[in-house]
Image (cartoon, rainbow, N blue to C red):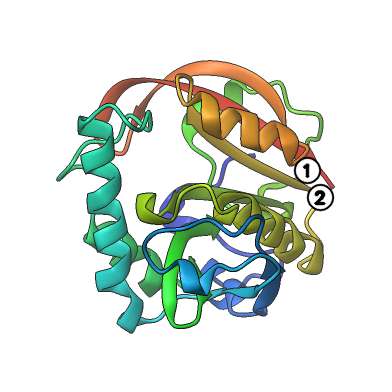
Amino acid sequence: MIIPYAKRMSGNGRSLAASALRFRSFPVTMEGSGSGTDSRHFREGSMQTIRQATGADLARIGGIYERIHTAEEEGRAMTGWVRGVYPTEATARAALARGELFVLETGGVIGGAAILNHAQLPCYTAGDWRTDSPAERVLVMHTLTVDPALAGRGLGTAFVRAYEAHARAAGCDALRMDTRETNLAARSMYRRCGFREAGSVMSEFNGIPDVPLVLLEKVL
């Protein structure tokens, strides 16, 4: 079942913003030591935290979005996102207001962000899903971003692992997400995290037309 975005409710009738507040912060261990910007915060084995975002995080998240758009325009990323269309700082601000915005933080540095909720795009009805659980028992990750200046340090993998931990703690049955078909690096990472591809679809995506998406699922 796909719950319309404006009417999503948790299983006990509360809004998803209220439901999301039940999620606790999770410490995570990063992979590799890396170098470059803020590398002192990403030493091998250092502990990082996935937590709900606050208003103080919005400017940093907006900066990450802008750097990803630059990487896309320079051919260094394959997200298919469009500067000024999606994602923007307004995207993060709206998710924050709903209680659905999460960040990966280490030593006061925001290295990545994502939106977690139960909202599935209309095109998800075409997915070859392994579970028919109701929407409130499927946790969906949207707009996973990692600062390009901190690429190669395992932040994306750490975020996905924490996302899974959040879902298990909330009693969810499955994880679902999508990524652009040409984003081979993301698809490879999700496979390593135990996701299976559940089909390819064409979709209008947040104001961007004709986006080829791959649907992904992990049954818990």
Quadrant into which the N terminus falls: top right
Disc number for residue 114: none
Q: Residue at x 55, y 67 (%)?
A: 42
Could one spot residue 87 in this view of the protein?
no
Vertical side of 43 occupied by 151: above or below: above
Q: Earlier in the sequence, mark 2 or mark 1?
A: 1
Q: Are marks 2 and 1 in contact (CB under 8 Å)?
A: yes
Provide the residue designation for mark 2.
173
- Marks 2/1: CA distance? 7 Å
| Left or right side of 199 for 99 | left
Write the residue at 81% across / 35% down: 131
Residue found at x 73% / y 60%: 167
Q: Position of residue 106 (x, y in %)?
A: 52, 76
Q: Amino acid at mark 1?
A: Ser
Task: Tell me if mark 1 has few (under 14), some (14-19) or many (20+) residues whose alpha carbon lies within 10 angstroms of its own.
Answer: few
- The amino acid marked with disc number 2 is Asp
In x, y percent, where is residue 40? 48, 73
The vertical placement of 77 against 83, above or below, is: above
Kind of element beneath mark 2:
loop
Q: Is residue 22 left or right of residue 34?
A: right
Q: How far across and down, in percent of the image, does residue 90 sit?
A: 23, 61
Q: Which residue is disc 1 drawn over?
A: 133
